[in-house]
Image (tube, helix red, strand yellow):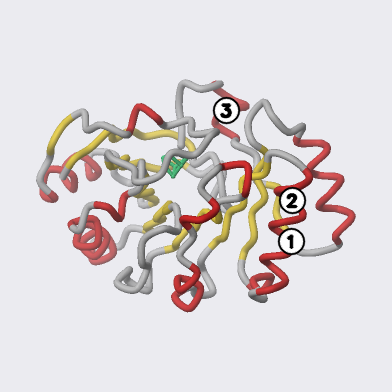
Amino acid sequence: MELSEIFYSLQGESSYAGLPCVFVRLAGCNLRCTYCDTKYAYEPKFLLSIDEILKKVEKYYPVKLIEITGGEPLLQADSIELMKLLINKKYDVLLETNNSISLKDIPQEVIKIVDFKTPSSGMCNSILWDNIKYFNGNDELKFVIADRQDFDWSLGIINKYDLIKHHILFSPVYEKLDRKELAEWIIETKLPIRLNIQLHKLLWGDSRGA
Ligand code: SF4
């Protein structure tokens, strides 16, 4: 498989934020979001077999939380086999995906963190709406918000597709939208929307985390 990096840190986002986690960052992305902070993952840094990836991950025992991220991890067909093997080994597997590739074949046990590309990303047209039918109760839906237009658009999508029954995460674009302003907007809605701060960036700036 084509990889960008494998590392161990704290989970920075989602309802798992703050927990020790091993990250497997697969290389390559089919999108080009305006605010992308992982451009370095567009090109592979090294190649590993699935077995080699598992061996590297196991070095961090007893950590059992693992995130498969990118880039866009689902561009590599083997990512599904990797997730299945991790589930068999009793890992809690998070998959961070950009919602432009079908989620049909993702194992049920995997917790999908699905990014709904807002207008400011420039990639709004890439959303695969058919994926909504594959969301389950554990999944988390992420909206990365740069301004009030993104915020209102996100509320409109949540309302239109009745997504509020899922875990909803609203993240401010780093250094673009004041997180306090986003917090105030969320409070006004009275909806169960979680303010998703990139904890790793608060702790370490751009240098670590996912
Ligand atoms: S989907 Fe993620 S990795 Fe790809 S361009 Fe957008 S932010 Fe970057």
* N-term mark: 3 or 1: 1
Q: Say whether mark 3 is within 8 Å of ligand 1.
A: no
* N-term mark: 3 or 2: 2
Which residue sits at x=41%, y=58%? 100
In the rendered structure, which amino acid carries the disc numbered 1? Leu
> From this viewpoint, is residue 63 visible?
no
In the rendered structure, which amino acid carries the disc numbered 3? Lys
User: Which residue position is annotated with label 1?
Assistant: 155
Question: What separation in Å lies between label 1 and label 2 (alpha carbons)?
Answer: 6 Å
84 or 186: nearer the viewer: 186
Q: Residues within 10 Å of mark 3 (few under 14, many from 20)?
A: some
Query: Is there CB contact under 8 Å for labels 1 and 2?
Result: yes
Query: Mark 2 falls on what kind of element?
Result: helix
Q: Residues within 10 Å of mark 2 (few under 14, many from 20)?
A: many
User: Which residue position is annotated with label 2?
Assistant: 151
Q: Residue 74 location, x and y as percent?
A: 30, 55
On the rendering, which quadrant does ligand 1 occupy? top left
Question: With 115 as the anchor, is 79 left or right in this view?
Answer: left
Q: Residue 146 location, x and y as percent?
A: 68, 39
Q: Nearer the viewer, mark 3 or mark 2?
A: 2
User: Which residue position is annotated with label 3?
Assistant: 201
Question: What separation in Å lies between label 3 and label 1 (alpha carbons)?
Answer: 26 Å
Question: What separation in Å lies between label 3 and label 2 (alpha carbons)?
Answer: 22 Å
Q: Residues within 10 Å of mark 1 (few under 14, many from 20)?
A: some
